[in-house]
Image: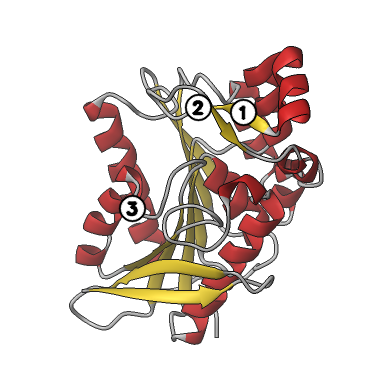
Amino acid sequence: MEEALTFTDPAGHKVAGILATPVEKTDRMAVLCHGFLSNKNSKTNQALTALLPPQGIGTFRFDFFGQGESEGPFERITVSLAVGQALAGLDLMSSKGYRKLALVGSSFGGLVALLAAAQRPRIACMALKCPVPDFPEMLNLEFGETGMAQWKATDTIPNVVPGGSGRIKLSYAFYEDSLCHNGFDAAKVITAPSVIVQGAHDEYVPPRQILKLSESLGGPNSVAWLPDADHHFSRPEDFQRMTTLLSNWVADHLNAPCGFGFG
């Protein structure tokens, strides 16, 4: 069963979400954080929403600021805003009686999940798909010195969506804000078990970021490397493998008889 929910972030913005629950009542919930220039109904979120409820786990997916149905112009999004919305989503699920919570994040959403988990130590587990713990480095590598200067001068970036063209509006304040958030430092205080599913041919996230993240995490963790996968897990077999790994891992940890939780 799915239910549309609207909640408010710490800055007062309205955030659109969808709660999907199993047939039988559960206290287990996975909060899904989508990637950059995506939305709550991303292919990954929909796949996880199909896979987790049959295992007794609900999902809560929501749109970050200025994306999907959430309030705000996308050009004004920041990492800080996104983290505040993820925390508000977690707290909403806790208030509804979901005691065992997982955070699941994709790419940009992986960074957001890291930063949010560091502020909510009672989450049960965290699952990350191609996370970007050092977003400023990734942006500099992707755009280069000239591209970064153009971004600063025009408040626009190239449309990095697969198949996208032209430029889109995004304030340079996004980059400046991202410099204030260190995913590796956040990882050090996360003691909940974590898993990272990563493509060995990721064209955006350097492998060293993933290795350093695994070393930085304060709790037990593992990295599942998919040898032929890119950042978007474009091949059907890679996408299926990724979503199966994530859903089964989350189910194993949320359905365990003991562990961290809210309440």
- Image height of 61 relative to 210, above or below: below
Between circles 2 and 1, the one closer to the viewer is 1
Residue 160 - label:
2
Q: Earlier in the sequence, mark 3 or mark 2?
A: 3
The answer to whether residue 260 is visible is no
Circle 1: residue type: Ile
Q: Decide: is 249 above or below 55.
A: above
> Is 242 situated left or right of 221 in this image?
left
Residue 127 at what x, y percent from top left?
A: 47, 50
User: Image check: 37 left or right of 72?
Assistant: left
The residue tagged with tag 3: helix, strand or loop?
A: loop
- Seen at 55% across and 79% down, the residue is 262
| Nearest to the observer: residue 232 or residue 26 | 232
User: Identity of the amino acid at label 2?
Assistant: Val
| SS label for mark 1 | strand
What residue is at 42 percent from the left and 54 percent from the top?
68
Residue labelled with disc 3:
41
Residue drawn 26% across and 83% down?
Answer: 25
Report how far apart the C-alphas of labels 3 and 1 lie in the structure. 23 Å
